[in-house]
């Protein structure tokens, strides 16, 4: 496997970020469902407002510090593992662990209740969670017919500020985000697959994360409660 390094570049333009060290959280959701365009538009606007309100209230840290700290982590993983695919996997695992804990903070601070379907869940992730934790707006696009898979389009990615990666590298530098989303949603009984299909660091015009619902996890009662 190719050994690669991600090199944060110095930049004098600071950006504000929340103090949270994790990525986006998830929101409770259900299975696939439809919904009229008017209802969807209204829900999206409400989520945008909610995300902006929470973002304004949260304390911030310097964006340069945030990006360079994450860059240091990735560089160390590349040096230690010496295999880009292993680095991608480790970043996803780290994100998963963050997501399983971050979901509680998200629910407590956002006040989001149960979503009616997976489409609403995706909108909450894009418009509220990404704004709340990373300060960026994200679009939801490319739904499949069953409303069980969509793309999250990131026009900005705070993790990749001041970063370059070697040409033709197979490193998914921000793969931690996919893990955060997967971990958070699993805590609200949604098993998903989440992966990058486009990455601006690798020459694409935008960042695109594919989000696919695999199953709704059934909550099972513990054995002692089943006995009468």
Image: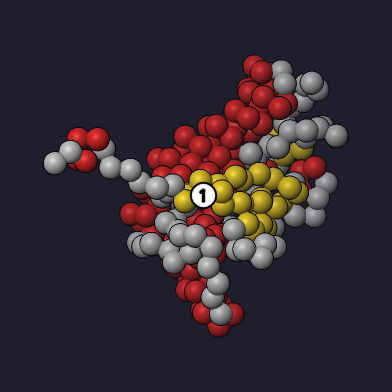
Seen in the picture, residue 206 relative to 72 is either above or below; the reply is: below
- Report the residue at 63% width, 57% height from top: 149
40 or 153, which is in the foreground? 40
Residue at the outermost left position: 228
Seen in the picture, residue 184 relative to 138 is either above or below; the reply is: above
Residue at the outermost right position: 167
> Mark 1 falls on what kind of element?
strand
Question: Is residue 64 in view?
Answer: no
Residue at the outermost bottom position: 38
Q: Please state the horizontal and vertical placement of residue 138, each as a whole percent of the image.
A: 61, 60
Seen in the picture, residue 225 relative to 81 is either above or below; the reply is: below
Seen in the picture, residue 185 relative to 164 is either above or below; the reply is: below
Question: Is residue 89 in view?
Answer: yes
Q: Quadrant of residue 142?
A: bottom right
Q: Quadrant of the N terminus?
A: top right
- Report the residue at 51% width, 46% height from top: 191
34 or 220, which is in the foreground? 220
Q: Quadrant of residue 66?
A: top right
Q: Please state the horizontal and vertical placement of residue 4, each as a whole percent of the image.
A: 77, 25
Horizontally, is 34 left or right of 171 in the view?
left
- Report the residue at 53% width, 63% height from top: 32
């Amino acid at each position: 496997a190719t050994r690669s390094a991600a090199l944060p570049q110095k930049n004098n333009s600071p950006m504000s970020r929340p103090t949270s060290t994790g990525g986006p959280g998830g929101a409770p959701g259900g299975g696939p469902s439809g919904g009229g365009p008017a209802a969807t538009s209204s829900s999206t606007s409400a989520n945008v407002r909610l995300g902006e309100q929470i973002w304004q209230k949260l304390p911030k840290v310097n964006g340069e510090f945030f990006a360079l700290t994450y860059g240091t982590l990735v560089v160390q993983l590349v040096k230690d593992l010496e295999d880009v695919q292993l680095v991608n996997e480790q970043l996803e695992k780290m994100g998963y662990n963050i997501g399983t804990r971050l979901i509680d903070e998200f629910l407590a601070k956002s006040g989001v209740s149960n979503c009616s379907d997976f489409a609403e869940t995706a909108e909450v992730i894009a418009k509220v969670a990404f704004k709340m934790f990373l300060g960026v707006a994200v679009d939801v696009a490319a739904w499949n017919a069953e409303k069980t898979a969509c793309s999250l389009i990131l026009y900005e990615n705070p993790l990749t500020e001041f970063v370059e990666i070697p040409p033709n590298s197979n490193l998914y530098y921000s793969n931690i985000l996919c893990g955060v989303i997967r971990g958070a949603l699993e805590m609200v009984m949604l098993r998903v697959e989440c992966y990058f299909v486009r990455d601006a660091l690798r020459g694409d015009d935008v960042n695109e994360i594919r989000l696919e619902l695999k199953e709704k996890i059934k909550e099972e009662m513990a054995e002692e409660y089943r006995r009468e």
